[in-house]
Image (tube, rainbow, N blue to C red):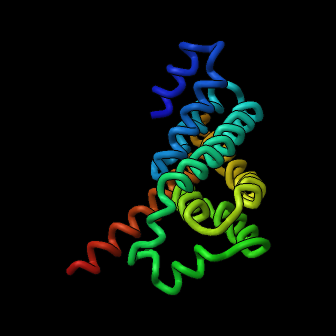
Amino acid sequence: MIDHAVELLQSYKSFALFISIFLNVMINIIGFVPSVFLTGANLVVFGFWKGTLVSFVGEGVGAVVSFVLYRKGLRKMVETKAFQRPNVKRLLEVEGKQAFALVISLRILPFVPSGVITFLAAIGRMSLGIFVVSSTLGKLPALFLEAYSVNHVVQWTWQGKTIITVLAGLLLIAVLKRTSAKK
């Protein structure tokens, strides 16, 4: 996947920045596609620091665009039965400092899908301003960690090999737990 993105960005070098940001916006709108492949491509094409910055800008713009689209198009979903559960309702009703802290906390966690956070913030009571600031601050450490990890995997350094080994081990454990639970 990284190879295809690298090829696309290098084919249109003068528009690569805009293409990358556009792809990041689309990934954010879709909500469940991981952006790690685009981050990897950005690192290869632009270098570590500029690639990280391009990914950060793309993720930020993508989060804002998807927030606005979700808020306009999906707000009526709050009225459905699934969103009337007490735990979900409490999450949707957070505002102000609570909303700010919640989004930062969730953005810092690397395994919480970005689209879910944006979706819940958009259909809830959170203001766009609080979402933008908290989302941006929360994405900084998570994106830096992602860029660092992807960079080492792409460069195939000992750190990259360690990351792949740990991820493969975690995946194996998850698969074994799942298959043993079904028996």
Q: Residue at x 54, y 46 (%)?
A: 28
Could you tell whether 76 is left or right of 122 in the image? left
Q: Residue at x 54, y 48 (%)?
A: 69
Q: Residue at x 64, y 25 (%)?
A: 18
**Residue 95 at x, y percent in the picture:** 71, 73
Return the residue nearer the eye: 55 or 88: 88
Return the residue nearer the eye: 149 or 140: 140
Vertical comparison of 131 with 161: above or below: below
Vertical comparison of 40 with 124: above or below: above
Count how many numbered circles sit on residues in the image: 0
**Residue 44 at x, y percent in the picture:** 62, 28
Tell me the quadrant of the picture where the C terminus can be found.
bottom left
Vertical comparison of 101 with 41: above or below: below
Return the residue nearer the eye: 5 or 74: 74
Q: Residue at x 51, y 28 (%)?
A: 5
Q: Is residue 158 something that shows in the picture?
A: no
- Quarter-of-image position of residue 50: top right
- Quarter-of-image position of residue 176: bottom left
**Residue 118 at x, y percent in the picture:** 58, 58
Tell me the quadrant of the picture where the N terminus can be found.
top left
**Residue 32 at x, y percent in the picture:** 46, 52
Vertical comparison of 122 with 85: above or below: above
Return the residue nearer the eye: 83 or 142: 83
In the displayed orientation, state which residue is furthest to the bottom: 86
Q: Is residue 60 something that shows in the picture?
A: yes
